[in-house]
Amino acid sequence: MKAAWCLGLVLATGCATADVAGDEANYESAVASTDCPTAPKRAVTWWRWATVEDFETLAWSPDGTEILVSEHVFEKKSALFGYDDTRKDCHRLAVYAPNGARLREMMALTPGWVPYFPGSLTFMSSYAIEHVQNYALDPVGLWQAIHVGPNGERKTLVVWPKCSHGQVIPSPDGTKMAMLNIASNCTDTSKPSVSTVRFLDAAGDPIGNAVNLPFTTWPVGTWTPAGTFVVTDRSTWVRVDAAGTTAPVSPLKCTEPGTTSSEVARDGRLAAFVNGKLGVIGTDHSRAFGCQ
């Protein structure tokens, strides 16, 4: 069973501060690998391997003309007893039209991605932000946020250490991102958590310095349609800007979606895979960005 993902937050179990990665050395090429599936796509049986494609999560572009889909591709063999066997887990990002037509691949099949925990996805047309779990990072941490460029190039924005979690949320126009980091005390849960915000440009490079937030519990962040970033613990609401200043603001009506790209189109359209085909399945204006 796949684990549920909630509000783009990530959670692990240990102690440290967030590790922000912003140099060129963190870029990785997204080239198909022999570590990815090579078996034919066919019925899964116990005597031979078959390639399986699984659709994990999706995000609409801000203008509502495209949908980015996170695809998990792996080989599988059914087991006579117990759990089925899987291997060669790889990951791909593909762009679709709302009518289900596959337009292009933003990132080719790439190994080293852990299945079952795809995390959240935002798609700003020229780049994407994906939260994924990567067991190769253990014991440093498990969750990371990755910037994916238009040609599939990857850049790690942050690795949340154990006992830390957070969000990376692009602004409504995609020109910058807000990175919310939340660290708790691993050995003494009676001590308050520490929250900070740091802004990044569209390429994922830091802007200014981290800003400390006045929260002792886990807050969430959201952008408003006017381009203001607001963080709240649901009792206190503060505005944070890239200059490093904070100010109290009136409560917003909602915190989700946090930006113009989410699982819901800006006009409220909802998309899903039905019988293996992507399509629009309805409209819910109350879930669209702008409810703030």
Image (tube, rainbow, N blue to C red):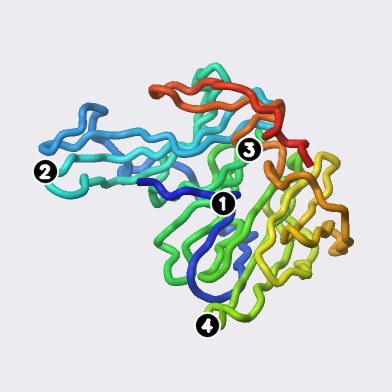
Q: Quadrant of residue 123?
A: top right
Q: Which residue type does callout 3 highlight?
A: Ser
Q: Secondary structure at mark 1?
A: strand
Query: Horizontal placement of 28 versus 80: left or right?
Result: right
- Which residue is drawn at the image coordinates 45% and 38% (left, top)? 56
- Which residue position holds label 2? 80
Q: Nearer the viewer, residue 272 or 235?
A: 235
Compared with 273, 90 (above or below) is below
User: Is residue 53 positioned above or below 163 on the image?
Assistant: above
| Residue density around tag 4, few if under 14, some if 14–19, many if 20 or more, within 10 Å | few
Q: Write down the residue under mark 1.
A: 146
Q: Which residue is mark 3?
A: 262
Say above or below: 57 vs 20.
Answer: above
N-term mark: 3 or 1: 1
- The x and y percentages for residue 63 are 71, 27
Which badge, 4 or 3, comes first in the chain's sequence? Answer: 4
Q: Residue at x 65, y 73 (%)?
A: 193
- Closer mark to the observer between disc 1 and disc 4: 4
Pointer 4 residue: 187
Q: Position of residue 44 (x, y in %)?
A: 20, 33
Q: What's under tag 2, amino acid-wise? A: Leu
Q: Nearer the viewer, mark 1 or mark 2?
A: 2
CA distance for labels 1 and 4: 29 Å
Q: Indicate which disc, 1 or 4, sits on the residue closer to the N terminus.
A: 1
Residue flagged by tag 4: what amino acid is it? Answer: Thr
Q: Earlier in the sequence, mark 4 or mark 2?
A: 2
**218 with respect to 117 (left or right):** right
The residues tagged by marks 3 and 1 sit, at their Cα atoms, a distance apart of: 16 Å
